[in-house]
Image (spheres, grey):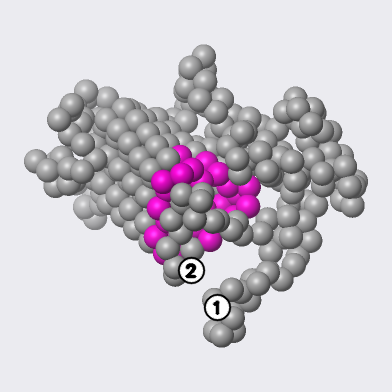
Amino acid sequence: MSLTELQHSIERHFAAGPAAIGDTDAMTAFLALRTALESGEIRSASPDPTTPTGWRVNAWVKQGILLGFRLGTLEEFPSGGYAASGLSFVDKHTFPARVFAAADGIRVVTGGSAIRSGAFVARGVVCAPPMYINTGAYVDEGTMVDSHALVGSCAQIGKRVHLSAAAQIGGVLEPINASPVIIEDDVLVGGNTGVYEGTIVRRGAVLAPGTILTRGTPVFDLVHGTVLRATDESPLIIPEDAVVVPGSRAVTKGKAHPNTDYWGLSLYAPVIVKYRDEKTTLSTTLEDLLR
């Protein structure tokens, strides 16, 4: 089946709604989609220099993932090395955990990590336990997914990215046409950082520990004196090589205003404090970047 034929089949079975349940042709189409996702042949979002954001959302791929949930039934999965602990795992039978071999060149360190089927993980990726990569995600070569990190459904992670401990890269399956979270090549994502709601982080950016980015989060660029925001047509975009740290801004209305019963409140605000130069590498510590 060609990709064009696969797309038409997925769109047709998705549009059928509950009528697709039990349809062997629908299951065949979904399994072909899942295989293509795992090989990296198709993606939920693809680089496209002709679009304003540089990325194109492949809505039919997300439809195919949702079709898989519709077709799936609950099934018990082997608990592997956790059998003695009494843990059990139950999920839709269409989305079991992936299993890798040494020849794949992917390190999944012992300790409770899982990569759901339908996710692409490239050679050279290191997964430190416990971490989780959801279906539809794309994790490119040389990336490190550290302990307690999450790569959400359909998130796109570039080459040589470091997702530090407890970093949360949100998933976006619905709305169908919504852009997923995209982390481009050579980005350093600090610990306990959260990137959600279709945010795009451009190549080489650094997100300091504790930074939170959402569609509704304004980002204050001290270098250029501008405020970055998402619009109806575009997600929040962090510029290439930007160094973003958690900051705050004063609340000047209501009880926070000095002329009232003053509470002295401030709100969280991510701040771009500088841009990486040519001498800066990912091996440079965040402390050096901020000096």
What stretch of residues is rendered in magenta? 114-140
Q: Position of residue 235 (x, y in %)?
A: 47, 31
Q: Position of residue 200 (x, y in %)?
A: 43, 33
Q: Position of residue 185 (x, y in %)?
A: 37, 34
Q: Is residue 61 left or right of residue 166?
A: right
Q: Quadrant of the N terminus?
A: top right
Which residue is label 2 attached to?
Answer: 112
Above or below 214: residue 134: below
Q: Is residue 155 visible?
A: no
Q: Residues within 10 Å of mark 2 (few under 14, many from 20)?
A: some
Toward the top, the furthest residue is: 50
Q: Position of residue 148 (x, y in %)?
A: 41, 61
Which residue is label 1 attached to?
Answer: 82
For the point 52% across and 41% down, which residue is it? 138
129 within the magenta span: yes
Q: From the viewer's side, name the closer residue of 167 and 255.
A: 167
Secondary structure at badge 1 equals helix
253 within the magenta span: no
For the point 76% across and 27% down, which residue is it? 2
Instruction: Name the amino acid type tagged 1.
Output: Tyr
Instruction: Name the amino acid type tagged 2.
Output: Gly
Please report contact status of discs 2 and 1: CB closer than 8 Å, yes or no.
yes
Q: Quadrant of the C terminus?
A: top left
Mark positioned earlier in the residue sequence (2 or 1): 1
